[in-house]
Amino acid sequence: MMGVTEKKGESLRRGLEPRHIMLMAMAGMIGTGIFKGSGDTLSIAGPSVTIAYLVCGLILFIVMVALAEMAIAFPGLNMQHLMYKAFGFRVSIMIGWLYWINWMIVTVVEVLAAGSFLNYWFPGVPLWLLAGLCGLFIIMINLFQVSLYGEFEFWFAGIKIGAIIVFIILGFLILFGVIQGPTGPADPVKNLFGYGGFFPNGVGGMVSALLVVIYSYGGSELIGLTVNEARDVEHVLPKVIKTVVTRVAMFYILPIIIICSLMPWNSVSATESSPFVQVFEAVGLPGVPHLMNFVLLTAVLSAGNSGIYATTRTLYAMAERGEAPRFARKLTKRGVPLGGIGLTAGFLAAGVVLAYLSPNQIINQLMSIPGFTISLVWIAICLAELKLRPNYDRLPFFRMVGFPYMTIIGAAALSLIFITFVLNPANLVGTLTCLGIMTFLIIISFYIRPEQKPATGKTSSDDD
C-alpha cells in the first residue's frame, strides 16, 4: 500500500532533469489542439489559419519570457506563488482555480480524444469505455515518483514530436512528387488558393480561429509549475523558452501548410479522424494512416499526462496557502500529491459520463472553454510581470526585451482575442459557461481565507 503523508516538512521533490522540462513544455502544447483541433481551425479560417498560428506564436513567446523572467527573479516560486506575490490572495485564488479548471477540461478532452483515436480501430466499442481505459492508464502513470513520470513523459513526448517531423518530411516528399498516391500528384496552389482563396471566410474567419489556436498552444506555460521540482532552474528555463518557441513554427505552421497543400481545406473533416490521418488516407499511402493514428494516440495520452501533472501541482500549491481543500496537500512517500490525483480522477470519471451522454459533440463543445480560460491566465502572467518588475532585487540576465511595451502588447492582444470570443454569438454556450465559472470564483474568493503566505520573497499587500 502506498504511504501517505501530510507532514509539515514534506514537499514536492526535485526529480525533473532539464531534458524532462524541455519535452514537458513542448508536450503540453502538442496534443488535441493540433492533432484534432486543426480540423476545427481549418473549417473556421481555411488556409489563413496559418497566420493565426503565427500571431499566437508571437504572443506565446511574450508570455513564456515574462514567466521565465519572474521565475528567475524569485527563485523557488512557481506560477501560482507569483500570482499571489503580484496581486494578493483574492486574485491568486481566482487565477489558481481558473488554471486548474482549464487543465482539468484539457485533460478530459485529451482522454476523450484518445478514446476517439482508438475508435478508428474499434468502431464498435463505445467512446466512453475507451476513454475510461485511457484515463485509468494516465492516472496510474502519475502515481509514480516525479523522476519516473518525467522519464515516461520524455519518451512519450519524443514519439509525437518525432511523428510530426516524419509527417512534415513525408508531406514534402508528396508535394515534390517523390512519393505519389493513386490520386496523382498534389496541386498545392489550387488547394491553397482555389477554394475561396487564402481567406475563404474573410479576415473574420481567421480572427475567430485565434481562440482555438490559443487552446492549442496552452500548456507551454506548464514550465511555470516545474520550478519546485526542477534542478538548475536559472539555466534551464531560458534554454527551454528559446527552444520551445522557435519550434512552434515547425510543429504547427508547417503541418497546417502541408495539410492545406495536399488536399482542399474544405474536404478536411472536423468531426471524423485527425486531419493528419485524413491526409494520408487521401493520398493513398498503405499502412501509414494506421501508424499515424497510433502516434496520435500516444500524443494525446502524453498531453493528458501533462494535464494531470498540472492539475495536481496547481492544487498542491493552492492547498499550501489554504486556497484549496487540505486533502490536496497529501503526498505519498514518493512525493506525489495523492489528494490532487484523486480529485482529478473524479473529474475524469465525469468526463467519461459526458462521453456516454453525448459521444458525437462532447469533444468540440469542451474545446471552446480552455481557449477562454488560458487567455485569462496568460493575461494574468503579463500583468504580473508589469507589477513585479519594480520589486526585483536585481534584473535577471534573461528578461523581456522592450519592456514594458512588449508585455503590454501581449496583454492587449490577448484581451482583444478574449473580447472577440465573448461577442461572437457562435460561442454563446462556451461564453456563458466560462462567465459562470468566473462569477463563481469571484464569489468564493471572498469566503476563503489564506492559511499562510509564500515562504520565499517579499509579498504584496493582501487585498482582503
Image (cartoon, rainbow, N blue to C red):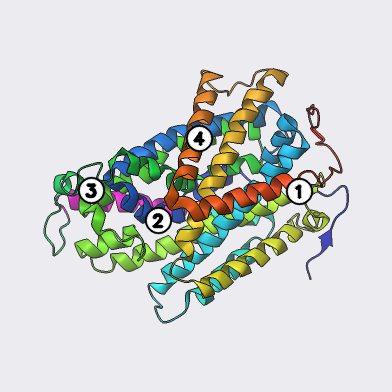
Of circles 1 and 2, which is in front? 1
Furthest residue to the bottom? 124
Disc 4 residue type (three-letter): Leu
Query: Label 4, on which residue?
Result: 414
Dot 3 crowding, Cα within 10 Å, few <14, some 14–19, many 20+: some
Earlier-in-chain disc, 1 versus 4: 4
**Please, what secondary structure does the residue beneath circle 1 have?**
helix
Of circles 1 and 3, which is in front? 1
Q: Nearer the viewer, residue 14 or 211?
A: 211
Dot 2 crowding, Cα within 10 Å, few <14, some 14–19, many 20+: many
Question: Is residue 343 something one can see in this rendering?
Answer: yes
Of circles 4 and 3, which is in front? 4
| Magenta extent | 158-178
The label number, if any, that marks residue 172 in the structure image: 3
Disc 3 residue type (three-letter): Phe
**Please, what secondary structure does the residue beneath circle 4 have?**
helix
Q: In 3D space, how far apart are the residues under numbered discs 2 and 4 (Cα atoms)?
A: 23 Å
Query: Label 2, on which residue?
Result: 35
Earlier-in-chain disc, 2 versus 4: 2
Query: Label 1, on which residue?
Result: 444
